[in-house]
């Protein structure tokens, strides 16, 4: 059979000195008993664990992430019950969440949310992503040569959807968006240059997505749920979805918002998780290390949400 799964989460609101009442805009979904026989073949070994994080942004970010986090699982569940195939059902659930947000009373004109969801079914791992939250797996590399935790190597299960990605930059510009940094938009740097500083450098000023004629929005991600004003310029809720077979080399799956990934590598997160036997302790340790790194690098901290699932394969 498949592994037994132990999953837990940790979340902490961002720290902004000038806004002590800041509310956490992250939402999460952790459903340890998801699906059941409705999922057809994929669930023949019992139920699955669904893990999702949703990082809201903009003045209605909290409402956007809340709608998406409740709508996505119910849509996916409905579609699987109707017999839809894994990848199609998962991709459609992101679009369903986007449509539900549009219909809701939350103003998603210039607010939205990321969404990254991992579904462990026993036989398979399904991962879907919109935005710049991230899912990572810790996989035994067999020979211990990676020099990390007994040779457990971090593998990114998603690719951050930002204008740093060449394919995303091209796609956005074809849709009429401008892709520029704050400095370029405000005339401090050459607006035609695409040589953008990576995250590690000082004065990090990432490329952002702007409408063609106004300096409104400036989204640091190239896809999202919500952000209705930018949907005509290529900012889409179309997810990138991947289904992979689970095998006994997979030890842990981590799903987290960019509050974790801003100052922490995927490998570091896996290494921290594997120092713990308990999933909740692992999640809390990653969250607390992330917060410390924010405060060591900045005067503020983003909201931080992390879900950890340990896969126990028995003997």
Image (cartoon, helix red, strand yellow):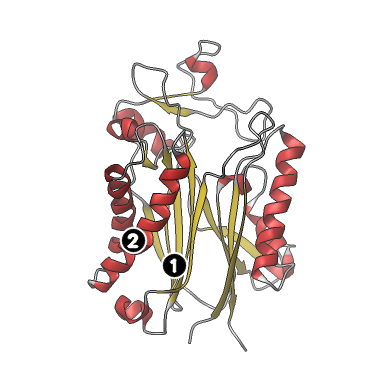
Determine crowd level at label 2: few under 14, some 14-19, many 20+ residues with C-alpha closer than 10 A: many
Which of the image's four quarters has the C terminus?
bottom right
The x and y percentages for residue 306 are 59, 56
Q: Nearer the viewer, residue 41 or 113?
A: 113
- Disc 1 secondary structure class: strand
Disc 1 target residue: 119
311 left or right of 88 in image: right
Q: Nearer the viewer, residue 204 or 145?
A: 204
Q: Residue at x 67, y 43 (%)?
A: 263
- Disc 2 secondary structure class: helix
Q: Nearer the viewer, residue 78 or 160?
A: 78
Classify 152 as above or below 157. Answer: below
Marks 1 and 2, how far apart in space? 10 Å
* Marks 1 and 2, the one that precedes in the sequence: 2
154 left or right of 116 in image: right
Q: Residue at x 45, y 31 (%)?
A: 219
Classify 126 as above or below 106. Answer: below
Classify 122 as above or below 233. Answer: below
Q: Do callouts 1 and 2 mark residues in contact (Cβ within 8 Å)?
A: yes
Q: Is residue 301 visible?
A: yes
10 left or right of 32 in image: right
Determine crowd level at label 1: few under 14, some 14-19, many 20+ residues with C-alpha closer than 10 A: many
The disc placed on residue 90 is: 2
């Amino acid at each position: 059979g498949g592994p037994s799964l132990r999953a837990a989460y940790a979340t902490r609101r961002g720290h902004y000195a000038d806004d002590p009442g800041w509310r956490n805009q992250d939402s999460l979904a952790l459903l340890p008993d998801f699906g059941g026989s409705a999922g057809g073949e994929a669930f023949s070994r019992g139920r699955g664990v669904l893990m999702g994080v949703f990082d809201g942004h903009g003045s209605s970010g909290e409402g956007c992430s809340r709608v998406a986090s409740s709508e996505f699982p119910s849509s996916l569940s409905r579609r699987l019950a109707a017999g839809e195939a894994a990848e199609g059902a998962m991709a459609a659930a992101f679009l369903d969440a986007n449509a539900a947000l549009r219909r809701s009373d939350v103003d998603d004109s210039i607010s939205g949310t990321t969404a990254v969801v991992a579904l462990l079914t026993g036989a398979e791992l399904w991962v879907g992503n919109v935005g710049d939250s991230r899912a990572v797996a810790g996989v035994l590399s067999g020979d211990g040569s990676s020099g990390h935790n007994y040779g457990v190597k971090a593998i990114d299960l998603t690719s951050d959807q930002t204008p740093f990605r060449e394919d995303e930059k091209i796609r956005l510009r074809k849709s009429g968006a401008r892709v520029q940094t704050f400095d370029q938009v405000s005339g401090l740097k050459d607006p035609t240059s695409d040589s953008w500083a990576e995250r590690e450098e000082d004065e990090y000023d990432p490329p952002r997505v702007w409408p063609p004629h106004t300096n409104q929005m400036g989204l640091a991600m190239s896809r999202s749920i919500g952000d209705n004003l930018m949907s005509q310029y290529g900012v889409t809720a179309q997810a990138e979805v991947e289904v992979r077979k689970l095998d006994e080399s997979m030890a842990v799956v981590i799903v987290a918002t960019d509050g974790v990934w801003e100052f922490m590598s995927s490998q570091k997160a896996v290494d921290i998780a594997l120092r713990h036997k308990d999933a909740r302790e692992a999640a809390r340790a990653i969250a607390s290390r992330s917060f410390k790194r924010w405060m060591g690098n900045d005067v503020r901290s983003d909201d931080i949400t992390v879900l950890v699932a340990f896969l126990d394969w028995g003997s």
